[in-house]
Image: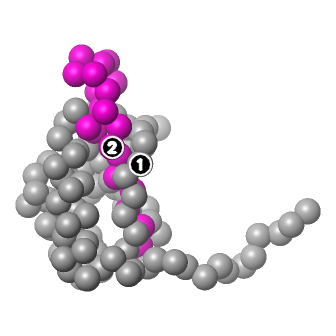
Amino acid sequence: MMELPEELPQLYKRHVFACATQRPPMHPRGSCGHNGAGLLWERLGNRIEAEGLGATTGFTMSGCLGFCSAGPLLVIYPEGVWYAPKTEADIDQIVDRHLKSDELAEDLVIVLSR
């Protein structure tokens, strides 16, 4: 059996996963896509590139992250911080504070439970 190495080289300092799931408007679970995620994630991708963060910050639009009614949602690893941005200004705050300044955008953090 192969053992996991103690430490692997990291491709990125951080990796952002943003839910892009789009369900029909009346779906009982809702969806990040239906709640405006598309424009937010476009803004996020553009800001990551404009700020020169592309080499150190991965950005992946993902499938469902499992907390549909709270969306749009994104999670940033390795910290495991979840954010629920609603506006482009929220995206700017996440980029400026979390991705550029290494601090939480506290008012946008969402604490989820199963």
Which mark is drawn over residue 62?
1
Q: Secondary structure at mark 2?
A: loop
Give the image quarter of residue 112: top left
Left or right, 26 with respect to 14, comes to left
Q: Is residue 29 magenta?
A: yes
Q: Image point 31% across, 27% down: which residue?
A: 23
Quadrant of the rendered image containing residue 80? bottom left
Q: Find the magenta span and give its range.
A: 14-33
In this rendering, does residue 111 appear at all? no
Residue 112 against residue 13 in the figure, above or below: above
- Residue 14 appears at what percent x and percent y? 41, 73
Q: CA distance from mark 2 to mark 1?
A: 6 Å
Asked if residue 42 is positioned above or below residue 48 in the image, the reply reads: above
**Residue 38 in the image, given as x and y percentages of width and height:** 22, 46
39 to the left or right of 13: left
Asked whether the beta carbons under mark 2 and mark 1 sit within 8 Å of each other, the answer is yes
User: Would you identify the image quadrant in which residue 99 lies?
Assistant: bottom left
Of residues 75 and 10, the one nearer the viewer is 10
Taking depth in this image into account, of 36 and 99 the one nearest to the observer is: 36
Q: Who comes first in sequence, dot 2 or dot 1? A: 2
Left or right of 16, for residue 42: left
Residue under pointer 2: 20
Q: Amino acid at mark 2?
A: Ala
Tag 1: Cα neighbours inside 10 Å, few (<14), some, or many (≥20)? Answer: few
